[in-house]
């Protein structure tokens, strides 16, 4: 069963760290979590994927839905430290063009 | 070099079965000595197919799902069978949806990952054949 760890990063960023498999069971929970965070006023979100051992297309859908929600609220959603499986899936779906991976959560919003 | 392995399971196609199917693939692939990269490709594709079967059923009327994973003859192969409603789809339609779409990537992704991908509807069963050619 997946667990989502949430922590406050620097500069008003919230970091979500999914531990486990981000599959069709877990994806709706991630969507809800991001919606709650954005509705709570935090619009800069990093999803730290170093302990996300697996993602499927529903997990990707949750990331894209979160990206849209964050941008509509004036912020952004970025990803950090993807595992090899996540990188493969991002590349094959061309989503590496809209979800640029940063080496670590701390670097994801370093440029602005 | 891989060693031959084969294992199956039968479950109801509900979200509860996802971990069981995932673990079955990992067990067979690891036991056979399949390289991580091939295992990742196969697992990702197979789980998209199982997602698809679950989405076509309902929890009240979940299809019966049979999954067989096999390593033999230089291939990692899977057969996913269900007795759910007919699935009609075009396995040649592998275009990804728009980047900001939040669904519709599952089957195109599976098609890109696999070396062999076939679907047939026979005797009121949907059968998916998946294969990855191994390097050894």
Image (spheres, coloured by chain):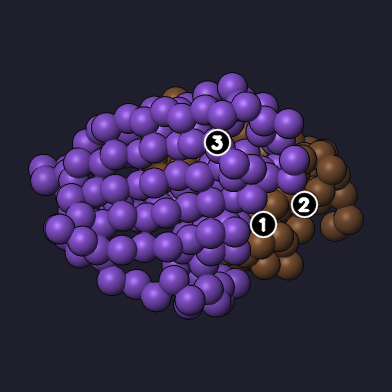
Question: Are both tags, 3 and 1, on one chain?
Answer: no
Q: Mark 1 sits on what residue?
A: A90
The label on residue A101 is: 2
Shade of chain B as shown in the rendered figure: purple
Would you say the residues marked 2 and 1 are in contact, meaning their CB atoms lie under 8 Å apart? yes
Question: Are both tags, 2 and 3, on one chain?
Answer: no
Q: Give me the chain letter of mark 2.
A: A
Question: x%, y% of residue B50?
Answer: 37, 47
Q: Which chain is brown?
A: A
| Picture residue at 45% right of the left edge, 37% below the top | B69
Q: Which of B126 and A12 is in front in this view?
A: B126
Question: x%, y% of residue A69?
Answer: 53, 61
Helix, strand or loop at mark 3: strand
Q: Give me the chain letter of mark 1.
A: A
Helix, strand or loop at mark 1: helix
Image vertical order of residue B119 relative to residue B31, above or below: below
Q: Nearer the viewer, residue B31 or B94?
A: B31
User: Could you classify mark 2 by the number of other residues whose Cα lies within 10 Å: few (under 14), some (14-19), or many (20 or more)?
Assistant: many
Q: In which quarter of the image is residue A97?
A: bottom right
Please identify the quadrant where the N terminus of chain A is shown. Answer: top left
Label 3 or label 1, whichever lies nearer to me, is 3
Q: How many labels does the image show?
A: 3
Question: x%, y% of residue B2?
Answer: 67, 30
Q: Mark 3 sits on what residue?
A: B71
Please identify the quadrant where the C terminus of chain A is shown. Answer: bottom right
């Amino acid at each position: 069963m997946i667990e989502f760890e949430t922590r406050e990063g620097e500069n008003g960023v919230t970091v979500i760290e999914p531990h486990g498999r981000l599959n069709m069971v877990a994806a709706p929970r991630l969507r809800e979590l991001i919606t709650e965070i954005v509705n709570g006023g935090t619009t800069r979100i990093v999803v730290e994927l170093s302990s996300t051992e697996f993602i499927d297309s529903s997990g990707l859908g949750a990331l894209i839905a979160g990206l849209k929600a964050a941008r509509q609220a004036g912020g952004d959603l970025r990803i950090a430290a993807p595992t090899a499986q996540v990188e493969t899936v991002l590349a094959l779906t061309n989503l590496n063009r809209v979800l640029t991976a940063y080496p670590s959560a701390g670097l994801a919003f370093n440029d602005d | 070099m891989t060693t031959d392995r084969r294992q199956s399971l039968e479950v109801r196609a509900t979200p509860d079965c996802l971990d069981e199917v995932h673990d079955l693939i990992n067990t067979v692939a690891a036991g056979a000595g399949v390289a991580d990269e091939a295992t990742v490709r196969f697992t990702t594709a197979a789980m998209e197919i199982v997602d698809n079967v679950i989405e076509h059923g309902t929890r009240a009327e979940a299809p019966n799902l049979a999954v067989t994973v096999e390593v033999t003859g230089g291939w990692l192969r899977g057969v996913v069978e269900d007795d759910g409603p007919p699935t009609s789809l075009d396995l040649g339609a592998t275009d990804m949806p728009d980047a900001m779409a939040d669904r519709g990537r599952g089957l195109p992704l599976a098609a890109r990952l696999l070396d062999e991908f076939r679907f047939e509807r026979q005797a009121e069963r949907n059968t998916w054949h998946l294969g990855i050619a191994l390097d050894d």
